[in-house]
Each structure stands twice: as structure tokens, then as C-alpha cells.
């Protein structure tokens, strides 16, 4: 009889947790991309999906050609150089580069191709990423940032693929 009372008490305890007391990870996040003078130059949307986070980026005001694009470890975009965003997001402690046998960083993304008008668009899955504060989360205590660089990423050279200075930066924030 005592076992039944304990089981019933445990069941009542579980059912009395108020709705919303356990916060769910957000389904979406976004980042407004700014240049060094603070002008808005684009937007990125992040959507939680099975197996990772879908990223959709639109940027303008860039020179035509390929530009390195990476997720960085800290949710800060202090002008003028965006160094406040830290290094590449790398929770798996791997080497830089989509082509590296010891890589890539989780924050390594394919180059952003920019057309003659200075506009670029990229979309794809960041496999294994989450929109929460966990070990694979983009929304941990110090956040994360999306950075677009001046030149193309060679996808091999550690730590940043020789992609040049940071031209645009956006802090990733839950929607």
C-alpha cells in the first residue's frame, strides 16, 4: 500500500508543474547585419529543424565575388572591426575549413557569393546546431554572431581561412 501512495504522490508532483515553467528552445532566431558605421546591410534568419539549424542570409553593400561567412563565439558586434565577436564558433574543437580533414568548425559555412550589384544570398543547414544554451547552442550565455568577411574563405587555413577583415556582423537573437 505504501508503494502505491508514493507513486501517486510522484505523479501528482509531476502534474502540478505550471505550464510554461520549463522553457522550450526558441524555434527561430535572427541577426541584423551591420557594417562598421552601424548601417544595416542585411539580415539572417535561423530556424530550428531536425538535425540542426537552417540559416538564410541576405546581405548587400559588399564587393562582388566570394566572401567568407562564419558563426562566431560571442554575441557582440562592436564597431568598427567586430573583433568583439570572438573567434569561430567551434564547440567540437576541430580545425578550420570545410575541406580540412580535421575540420570543420561548427561556424564554418560555405562562401557567400555576391553579385555585381553587391547583393548576396545563402541558405543551408548548420548540422548539429541548436537554438538553445546547450553545448551545441547558438544562444548560450554569451551568444553568437554571424560575420561576413572581406574575401573568400579558402576552406583550409586555420583558424579563419584567410578570409580577410570583418565587413558585416550581426548578433544572433531569439525571436
Image (cartoon, rainbow, N blue to C red):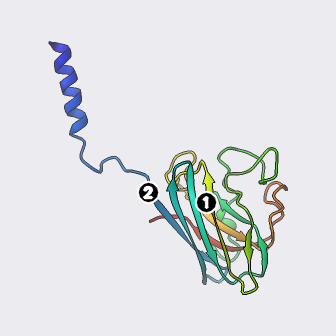
Q: Position of residue 114 (x, y in %)?
A: 73, 77
Name the one closer to the observer, 46 or 10.
46
Distance between mark 2 and mark 1 Cα atoms:
19 Å
Residue 26 is labelled as: 2
Task: Say which element carries label 1.
Answer: loop
Please identify the quadrant where the C terminus is shown. bottom left
Q: Quadrant of residue 9?
A: top left
At 59% across and 63% down in the image, what residue appears?
55
Q: Residue at x 16, y 20 (%)?
A: 5
- Count of numbered tags: 2
Tell me where residue 98 appears, x and y as whole percent.
77, 54
Q: Residue 31's image quarter? A: bottom right
Residue at image point 57% right, 59% down: 54
Disc ID at residue 135: none
Quarter of the N terminus within the rendering: top left
For the residue pair 61 and 125, the one nearer the viewer reads as 125
32 shown above or below 155: below
Instruction: Give the image location of residue 87, x and y in percent.
Output: 70, 58
Is 84 positioned to the left or the right of 15 in the image? right
Against 6, is 16 above or below?
below
Q: Secondary structure at mark 2?
A: loop
Q: Position of residue 119 (x, y in %)?
A: 68, 81
Q: Earlier in the sequence, mark 2 or mark 1?
A: 2
Circle 2 packing at 10 Å, graded few (<14), some (14-19), many (20+), is some
State the residue lying farthest toward the top.
1
Rendered view: 36 above or below 161: below
Q: Residues within 10 Å of mark 1 (few under 14, many from 20)?
A: many
Task: Quickly name the residue at label 1.
Answer: 74
Q: Report if the CB atoms under discs 2 and 1 are less than 8 Å apart.
A: no
Q: Is residue 53 left or right of residue 87?
A: left
2 or 1: mark nearer the eye? 2
Amino acid at each position: 500500500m505504501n508503494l502505491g501512495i508514493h507513486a501517486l504522490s510522484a505523479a501528482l508532483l509531476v502534474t502540478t508543474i505550471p505550464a510554461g515553467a520549463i522553457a522550450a528552445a526558441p524555434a527561430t532566431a535572427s541577426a541584423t547585419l551591420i557594417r562598421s558605421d552601424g548601417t544595416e546591410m542585411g539580415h539572417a534568419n535561423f530556424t530550428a529543424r531536425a538535425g540542426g539549424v537552417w540559416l538564410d542570409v541576405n546581405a548587400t553593400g559588399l564587393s562582388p565575388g566570394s566572401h567568407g561567412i562564419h558563426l562566431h563565439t560571442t554575441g557582440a558586434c562592436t564597431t568598427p572591426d567586430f573583433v568583439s565577436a570572438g573567434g569561430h564558433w567551434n564547440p567540437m574543437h576541430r580545425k578550420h575549413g570545410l575541406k580540412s580533414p580535421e575540420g570543420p568548425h561548427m561556424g564554418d559555412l560555405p562562401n557567400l557569393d555576391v553579385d555585381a550589384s553587391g547583393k548576396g544570398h545563402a541558405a543551408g543547414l548548420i548540422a548539429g546546431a541548436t537554438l538553445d544554451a546547450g553545448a551545441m547552442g547558438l544562444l548560450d550565455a554569451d551568444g553568437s554572431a554571424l560575420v561576413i568577411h572581406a574575401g573568400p574563405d579558402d576552406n583550409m587555413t586555420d583558424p579563419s581561412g584567410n578570409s580577410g577583415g570583418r565587413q558585416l556582423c550581426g548578433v544572433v537573437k531569439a525571436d
